[in-house]
Amino acid sequence: MDFLQAAPEQLIGVARQALAHWQWPADSRLELLKLRENAVYGVTAPDGRRAALRLHRPDYHSDAALRSELQWMQALGAHGVPTTRAIPAPDGGLLAAFGVPGDPAKVPVDLLDWVEGQPIGSAENCSFEGDEAIQDMYAEIGRLAAAMHAHSARWTRPPGFVRQSWNLDGCLGPHALWGHYSALEGLTRDELRLFDRAVAVVRTQLDAFGESPHRYGLVHGDLVPDNVMQGPQGLVVLDFDDCGFGWYLWEFTTALFWHIGQSSFEPAWQGYLRGYRSLRALPEEQLQLMPAMFLMRALVYMGWMHTRRETETAAQLREPVRETSVKLAQELLAKA
């Protein structure tokens, strides 16, 4: 099933099957909250209970990868990291799959605890009320990132655990996870040459940096403002759909990317560092890798904007990301 092409009644049909499997009342209200990689519904039962129901794209992650995501979320919650948790079905499973008439593909579904609050921002809007508010917000985000990484570094993963890798091949290789940057429509020959030269520098620097366990491990992978909820009890981390193995600096890169070129960048940078270092070391020399990391993040987004070119988000952010990528590539080469 292609979510972006599916009729609303098809998605609702899958959602209703899932609610029956989890033994929620048949007259529970469903509200579509998000339709991008997944279809996410808010569920409200007649007695007021709430949950989030996720319908996963059938061709995006394997069932083993989806179960692994949920297992890490459960483990983080038990470790004290504030995040939503999966609600087991009556049979104890965290994941189930359902189909629609005439479509052989099964749609994986999970049910998550409801989190009250609002996202702290979005890729389109990262505005906050003053530098001090930004610093404090990102100090907490940095602290949460450090807590996740500390857990990642010592957690014994369950048998069969599998997630994608945000390494050089996963980000920039010919079969990059989100598509190769060079496939984005409209790039000029000069831009492609610029990116290719800059990628050579990125590869050299990150090959030298290496993937030792204190630098590389399981990361959230998408710690953008959309995925951090401000709730009554503080910040909550949502949406582990892109969690996987990567450099711990990748978290920093992703959290700060949408602030590049904005007045919010410096206070967000300082806040994240302060919060992260309150729990976990982040040596100053590692920060020298950040220009290469930021460019790699930009090029990953360019690949995504090609493979998801039919989405409104890709259309809206395509040119800003392209311009940022050119600037980052030029700056990296100037310092190389």
Image (spheres, rainbow, N blue to C red):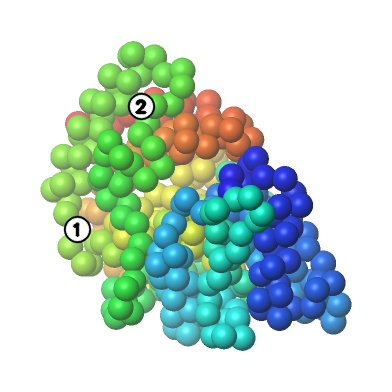
Q: Label 2: state its secondary structure.
A: helix
Residue behind mark 1: 211
- Amino acid type of the residue that numbered disc 2 sits on in the rendered structure: Ser
- Amino acid type of the residue that numbered disc 1 sits on in the rendered structure: Glu
Residue behind mark 2: 182
The span from disc 1 to disc 2 (Cα, nearest Å) is: 26 Å
Tell me what residue is drawn at x 47 percent, y 50 percent: 59
Judging depth in this view, the residue of 36 and 11 nearest the camera is 11
Q: Label 1: state its secondary structure.
A: loop
**Residue 149 picture quarter:** bottom left
Q: Is residue 307 left or right of residue 149?
A: right
Tell me what residue is drawn at x 74 percent, y 58 percent: 12
Judging depth in this view, the residue of 303 and 233 nearest the camera is 303
> In the current view of this chain or complex, which residue is farthest to the left?
208
Tell me what residue is drawn at x 65 percent, y 40 percent: 5
Neighbor class of circle 2 (other Cα within 10 Å; few <14, some 14-19, many 20+) is: many
Tell me what residue is drawn at x 39 percent, y 14 percent: 188
**Could you say where residue 204 lies in the image, as x and y percent from the top left?**
16, 39
